[in-house]
Amino acid sequence: MIVAVDYARYSSEELQDERSILDQQRGNEAKRARDVPEAEPIARHFEDAGISGASMINRPGLQALLRSAARGEFQIVIAESLDRLSRDQADAANIFKLLSFHGVRLITSEEGEIDEMVIGFKGTMSAMFLKGLAAKTRRGLLGQVERGFMAGGLSYGYRVTEVGTWAVVPEQAAVIVRICSLYADGVSPLLIAKRLNTEGVPGPHGCPWSPSTIHGHARRGTGILNNELYVGRMVWPRQRFVKDPRTGRRVARLVPEAERRTYPRLHLRILDDALWARVKARQAATRRLITAGPQQAHRGPYLFSQLTKCGVCGGGFSAVSRDQLRCFNKVKRGTCTNTRVIARLEVERRVLTALQQKFLADPVAFEAFSIAFVQETNRLRAEEAATRRAAPQELAAINRRSKDIMELLLRGFTDEAWKVELAEIERRRRELEAEIASTAAEPVFPALHPNMATIYRQKVEQLAAALDHPDEGHRAAARDTLRGFITAIVIPAGDGLLRVHGDLGKMLTAAGGASHAAAVEDVGCGGRI
């Protein structure tokens, strides 16, 4: 029995809709009936709706078709035309090679049966089509701009009218004037954002205000302080998008200034020239100050960088200076009420003290937990080792059985039960091979010492000492080891106690191994444990 499937696709830029998929599928079935009547009617369809054919990445329907072809589930693929599968020359050739490798014929209503010559010719034509389409799109946008319409995304401060033009939103325009006035008067974007968030003024798209929303990027023309449309000038084009062939995603590229043009849009003016000039003057002065000021030396991550969290909002507790930590959302956005300031060294001291003393305050309870943990871990290790031994043995046995059945079938002996058994053997073989591959990639965790409580206490003490070791390599290794145990350090408001969240099992397991022994062997402990 010959099995045929089909593939259909339309892209949004071609101004098609979901009816195009049904039309293509009807045409594909008609092509199957005319050219390959010996094949069964098409019962399985693969499709990608509203997705560009410029890349084979991020097309679930096409990827599913290729996976199914690799499993040998059909012998023929029918499509309306080759460019339904891909408009990219390299992708079209690759799809054809994959299908041919799996013994699958590719037939289209437009080109007939696909071969190497058709791939080369149509691939070149599709690539030329995409290049021409991009040029036509830019030409169409330029025409719209020349006729007084807008091109690009909607900016904060405006709305789209019923006839497709833009109009000023008075409430948002007042916020823009206020932001620029405050900035020109010397208020930083950070304080402006905090003030607006405190007053409950919604930002673009209803999100909280952030300093970057205000200062933006000068060269790209983004941010409230850089949008020339606010003074009645539209600069177009500022950037173009190209697709990264590795990911299929669009990447922005700045257009050279020589290729940019400025169009008057006086009906969209929000700021007067005097206020705009004051904003630009302060930006220039700020840039000069930053350029002339001392450059900060690159500093490596602190002991608990990115692990400190706010106990109120859950955001990061970041360094506002070299030695002080504060809630990021409180400082940058003003959306949190946690005003606590704590020294970085104080956080490090408290956490190390907790590991060395507070955590081990009840040695009897900790030792009982350690004994139970060691027993359970070692039991699981023994089970895993047994599983690792059993899987290859079972795989070898079913391979021998498969070989025996195949030899009997080749000699002319037939039995439907053997065919069923072969199918089951193949299914089980795939399971075992996947299981062996996954376990081979994971190291066997070591057996833990029965006296883990004592070993752990010694290791923590050595680790703390290694953090002060004169050699930077020892300090770095100890820091990485300690960070691997801790998932979060929660800092509440006021003077509440810090909460350390960590993986106790990981700590105990590491203490039983030698993963950080090199970092502590020379700190006076007499060698490794």
Image (cartoon, rainbow, N blue to C red):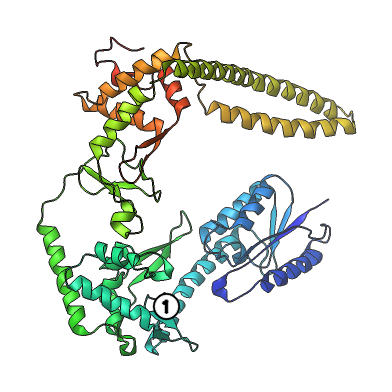
- Residue at the location (69% across, 73% down)? 19
User: Residue at point 9% right, 58% down?
Assistant: 292
Is residue 212 at least partly visible in the picture? yes
Q: How many marks?
A: 1
Q: Residue at x 30, y 69 (%)?
A: 223
**173 to the left or right of 445:** left
- Residue 150 sits in quarter: bottom left
**Residue 243 vs residue 62: left or right?**
left
> Mark 1 highlights which residue?
138
Q: Position of residue 448 (x, y in %)?
A: 48, 15
The reply to whether residue 261 is visible in this rendering is no
Which residue sits at x=46%, y=78%?
136
Residue placed most toward the observer, 481 or 40: 481
**Going by the image, does 93 lie left or right of 503?**
right
Q: Find numbered disc 1 in the image and state the secondary structure of the residue it sits on.
A: helix
- Could you tell me the amino acid type at mark 1? Arg
Work out whether residue 456 or residue 380 is closer to the camera in this orientation and state it.
Answer: 456
- 489 or 392: nearer the viewer: 489
Residue 105 in the image: state x and y as whole percent. Answer: 70, 55
- Local packing at callout 1 (Cα closer than 10 Å; few below 14, some 14-19, many 20+) is some
Spot the residue most to the top. 526
Residue farthest to the front, as pictured? 495
User: Looking at the rendering, which quadrant does residue 176 occupy?
Assistant: bottom left
Q: Position of residue 360 (x, y in %)?
A: 39, 21
Q: Quadrant of residue 507?
A: top left
Position in image of residue 326 (x %, y %): 28, 48
Q: Above or below — where is 343 with respect to 95? A: above
Q: Nearer the viewer, residue 218 or 182?
A: 182
Q: Quadrant of the C terminus?
A: top left
